[in-house]
Amino acid sequence: MINYTITKKAVVNAIQTLILFAVILFTFNISAHANNTWQAQKKFVDVFGKKMAYIERGEGRPIVFIHGNPTSSYLWRNVIPHVAGQGRIIVVDQMGMGDSDKLPAEETDRYRLVSYTKYFAEFMRKINAKTEVTLVLHDWGGAVGFDWAFHNQASVRGIAYMETFIKPLEWKDLPKDFHPTLKAVRAETGLKLVLEENMFIEKMLPSVTTRALTQAQMDEYRRPYLHSGDDRLPTLQWPREVPIAGQPADVATRIGNYSKWLTTSKVPKLFIDAEPGVFITGDVRKFAKSLPNQTTATAKGLHFMQEDDPDTIGKAISQFLISLP
């Protein structure tokens, strides 16, 4: 007959293990639930026969948040609570990203900047965001938003921006350690790196975020790109649009046009400077700080600063909104 002896230490260890497991499971479920809740809140509007997804909260003058590559409206989830009650909050998913529809292969200029600006302009018209609009811009969301502002100047109340494209670039304007990656994705090698390996989600997103994203957060960012190949094309086309040394010419011209306008525009601006930042550094940062009628705030982070310092960003935007006429 076997004699089982259970020590007090063994019982304590077993209980501690069960508690730890329960905490991990609870945390995972809360994070997953938060992600599902975000997705469930989305509305959809028909834009040129495609569904464009967005979050909408509150009433009043529009406050429109626009993300870039490779994120979605989810990027702003911890920023927008700070501006609750200050207007009609609109947080959009750009086409092919988040829960907005993918574009068909036969579409002209698919996932190019010219296409995104077209869809966004129609989106704004469809949701009736036409007057006294405040734009909050990041990454390629800046190019899309600045372009809309340039073509709708009388409709703009204010612009808050961070880590985005405020002028055409030269190679010297980008971090040297970023050059090989950008050159690779703009070449044939980009097909494997991005469409097969999902590089912008799996490597770039965590590498230019200071803190470690949780599994649930990474899964939400992965969700629009679970299938290799065509589903990931938006994340490949965006870096091929970066206007460096005048190429692509149409993108450089489009960004050059709104950049020139920004140097004279009296539209109130808020520049949220990332410390240390990635894309707005050096001469580009000097250019940003030179823009007229502008307030500057500083938030900690590399590129995806909304994941690193959302409270500072949200409070700065809130104060900016209060200051607007």
Image: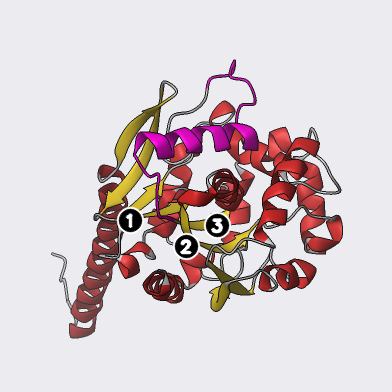
Rate crowding at label 2 as few (under 14), some (14 to 19) or many (20 or more) other CA atoms within 10 Å.
some
Q: Which is more N-terminal, label 3 or label 1? A: 1
Residue 137, numbered circle: none
Q: Which residue is mark 2?
A: 213
Query: Type of residue at label 2?
Result: Leu
Q: In this rendering, would 321 be left or right of 252?
A: left
Q: CB atoms at circles 2 and 1 under 8 Å apart?
A: no
Rate crowding at label 3 as few (under 14), some (14 to 19) or many (20 or more) other CA atoms within 10 Å.
many
Q: Which is more N-terminal, label 1 or label 2? A: 1
Q: In what quadrant of the picture does the N terminus appear?
A: bottom left
Inter-mark Cα distance, 1 to 3 = 20 Å
Inter-mark Cα distance, 2 to 1 = 33 Å
Q: Does the magenta portion include 117?
A: yes
Query: Type of residue at label 3?
Result: His
Mark nearest the camera among 3 and 2 is 3
Residue at horizontal 43 percent and vertical 42 percent from the top:
93
Query: Type of residue at label 1?
Result: Arg
- Which region is colored magenta? 104-133
Element carrying mark 2 = loop
Residue 138, numbered circle: 3
Query: Is 157 placed above or below 272 here?
Result: above
Q: In what quadrant of the picture does the C terminus appear?
A: bottom left
Inter-mark Cα distance, 3 to 2 = 19 Å
Q: CB atoms at circles 1 and 3 under 8 Å apart?
A: no
Mark nearest the camera among 1 and 3 is 1
Q: Which residue is mark 1?
A: 61
Instruction: Using the image as rendered, state which of residue 291 and residue 107 is in the foreground.
Output: 291
Instruction: Using the image as rendered, state which of residue 48 and residue 213 is in the foreground.
Output: 48
User: Where's residue 127, x and y in %?
Assistant: 34, 38
Q: Quadrant of residue 164?
A: bottom right
Residue at horizontal 23 percent and vertical 84 percent from the top:
9
